[in-house]
Amino acid sequence: MTIERVIVVGAGQMGSGIAQVAAGAGLHVILNDIKPEFVEKGFTAIKKNLSRDVEKGRKSKEQMDEIISRITLSTDLTNARDVDFALEAVIENIEMKSDVFRKLDEITPPHAILASNTSSLPITEIAAVTKRPDKVIGMHFMNPVPVMQLIEVIRGLATTAETYKAVEDLSKRMGKTPVEVNDFPGFVSNRVLMPMINEAIYCIYEGVAAPEAVDEVMKLGMNHPMGPLTLADFIGLDTCLYIMEVLHDGLGDSKYRPCPLLRKYVKAGWLGRKSGRGFYIYE
Ligand SMILES: CC(=O)CC(=O)SCCNC(=O)CCNC(=O)[C@H](O)C(C)(C)COP(=O)(O)OP(=O)(O)OC[C@H]1O[C@@H](n2cnc3c(N)ncnc32)[C@H](O)[C@@H]1OP(=O)(O)O
Ligand SMILES: NC(=O)C1=CN([C@@H]2O[C@H](COP(=O)(O)OP(=O)(O)OC[C@H]3O[C@@H](n4cnc5c(N)ncnc54)[C@H](OP(=O)(O)O)[C@@H]3O)[C@@H](O)[C@H]2O)C=CC1
């Protein structure tokens, strides 16, 4: 099937990055969030990223303007009535995501594919709230979306080969590499990554080392581009906690218990870079 018109629901760090990359691939994109200020914030981030590309000579000013002109801002989900493809990137919460999928199923045309950028939640369960589980799929981008190569593509129980192929093609059109995985809590990426981040937080909680030291060990010792605590702040500590809870509940193994310090920080509103404070303080 041909995908030309796309809606991205949720204009946070992931949604805005996805909208940027989709528009860069020539698609017409509606960027939707619940409040105008959230959509504006996402749009500002897109313009800033594209301006950097122009400054670095990777794009011309005309190319940047063209990409921007393909993005429409929206706070009204009924704008999804003409799309071929919807990509949900709201917070990592099954009720919120189910609510968005129920609405998208009612609003979008019958041929439209409904994809979720969920980091860990079951695609099969999200698909079950719609009348088109065959057209529901996980399309898990990595952060920062414009830079990272991978898209983890997750088939739900009812996802058809045709839907998978459309998402595989779309991923390649966006310049990314799709990797197929099965629908299990945390998929592959976060089943492997998040326990490492959680363990790094335990190192702080148990006084093994300071955050800077933990990050230096992993950067210099394991050649990770960012230390795990810097990365946790970058992902968002709320998102890290949600993912650990999904792993813990979904796999039923105590090795996935979220570190109490992670819970404490999230309760304090220390969500990392996006709130100005996490394991580090940001200006
Ligand atoms: C939680 C989940 O469900 C799944 C996930 O996403 S887990 C998170 C996965 N992501 C990671 O692990 C990221 C790890 N970190 C990195 O790879 C690197 O630190 C990084 C790419 C983010 C930054 O790289 P760096 O070398 O330290 O910094 P910097 O030199 O400023 O940036 C490198 C390039 O990325 C670009 N970049 C950095 N941050 C960016 C952003 N937020 N948006 C767009 N572009 C960005 C820069 O413009 C720069 O581009 P050029 O080299 O072409 O000029
Ligand atoms: N952060 C990361 O590194 C990665 C995250 N993901 C996944 O992507 C998703 C989004 O994460 P991220 O972008 O980091 O989170 P953010 O908190 O940056 O963004 C989420 C956005 O969605 C908005 N939103 C909430 N409910 C709705 C709704 N009903 N309709 C429209 N918009 C809504 C939020 O608004 P408000 O602020 O009001 O809540 C916010 O603007 C999550 O599922 C996460 O697990 C996937 C890969 C990597």
Image (cartoon, helix red, strand yellow):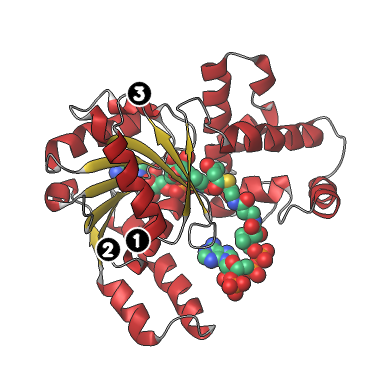
**Residue at disc 2, secondary structure:** loop
The residue positioned 60% from the left and 31% from the top of the image is: 191
Q: Which of 227 and 193 is in front in this view?
A: 193
Residue 157: x %, y % from top left: 35, 23
User: For the residues carrying marks 1 and 3, which lies nearer the camera in this image?
Assistant: 3
Q: Is there CB contact under 8 Å for labels 2 and 3?
A: no
In this picture, residue 62 sits left or right of residue 91 = left
Q: Dot 2 corresponds to which residue?
A: 27
Residue 192: x %, y % from top left: 64, 34
Pointer 3 local density, CA inside 10 Å: few below 14, some 14–19, many at least 20: some
Q: Give the residue type at disc 3.
A: Leu
Name above or below for residue 238 compared with residue 25: above
Q: Quadrant of residue 121?
A: top left
Marks 1/3: CA–CA distance:
27 Å
Mark on residue 43? Answer: none
Marks 2/1: CA–CA distance:
6 Å
Q: Is there CB contact under 8 Å for labels 2 and 1?
A: yes
Q: Which of 225 and 99 is in front in this view?
A: 225
